[in-house]
């Protein structure tokens, strides 16, 4: 499927694991839709990026946020709550991409208005396939305001 948009989809990955960052970059590199991936490694930096605070004054507003729950400084649960309580950010879809499969984490993410919850698979090929599935839906099918 192709897209009629000419502008790349802006994706913010909030992830502290270097391995998961590399895998996500690799999976999105071959995406069917042009995308720009920006990476921040903790919850405080995520909020600074989204609010365009130093050193992110020129940050591009993302069309999609891929958010890990287990982050240093400010965890993903707090980041999700802050995003969804901020009128200027609340419309950005946030997909939780985490190692957790805990039912409470899943329920709380959806109660906090996450757009989706995806548990990271352990294996390399499964991880790539999962990210490509996210790409297939969120970058190809979904329309953004």
Image (cartoon, rainbow, N blue to C red):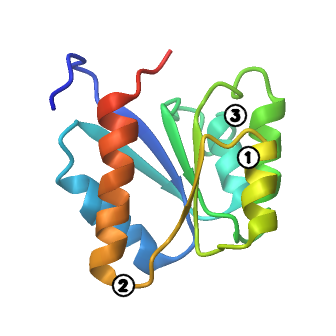
Look at discs 2 and 3 and give the one toward the viewer.
2
Above or below 34: residue 123: below
| Residue at numbered disc 3 | 51
Marks 3 & 1, CB-CB < 8 Å contact? no
Residue 56 visible, this angle? yes
| Residue at numbered disc 1 | 110
Label 3, residues with CA under 10 Å away: few <14, some 14-19, many ≥20: some
Q: Quadrant of the N terminus?
A: top left
- Viewer-side residue, 130 vs 12: 130
Q: Quadrant of residue 139?
A: top left
Above or below 140: residue 104: below
| Residue at numbered disc 2 | 123
Q: Quadrant of residue 68?
A: bottom right
Residue 75 visible, this angle? no
- Residue drawn at point x = 71 percent, y = 28 percent: 90
- Residue drawn at point x = 70 percent, y = 71 percent: 70
Helix, strand or loop under label 2: loop
Q: Earlier in the sequence, mark 1 or mark 2?
A: 1
Q: Earlier in the sequence, mark 2 or mark 3?
A: 3
């Amino acid at each position: 499927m192709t897209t009629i948009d000419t502008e790349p989809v802006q994706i913010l990955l909030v992830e502290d694991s270097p391995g998961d960052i590399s895998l996500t970059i690799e999976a999105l590199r071959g995406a069917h839709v042009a995308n720009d991936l920006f990476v921040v490694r903790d919850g405080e930096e995520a909020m600074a990026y989204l609010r365009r605070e130093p050193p992110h004054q020129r940050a591009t507003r993302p069309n999609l946020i891929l958010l890990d729950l287990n982050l240093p400084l400010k965890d993903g649960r707090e980041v999700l709550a802050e995003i969804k309580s901020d009128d200027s950010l609340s419309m950005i879809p946030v997909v939780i991409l985490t190692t957790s499969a805990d039912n409470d984490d899943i329920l709380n993410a959806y109660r906090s208005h996450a757009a989706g919850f995806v548990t990271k698979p352990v294996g390399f090929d499964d991880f790539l396939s999962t990210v490509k599935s996210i790409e297939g839906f969120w970058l190809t099918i979904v329309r953004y305001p």
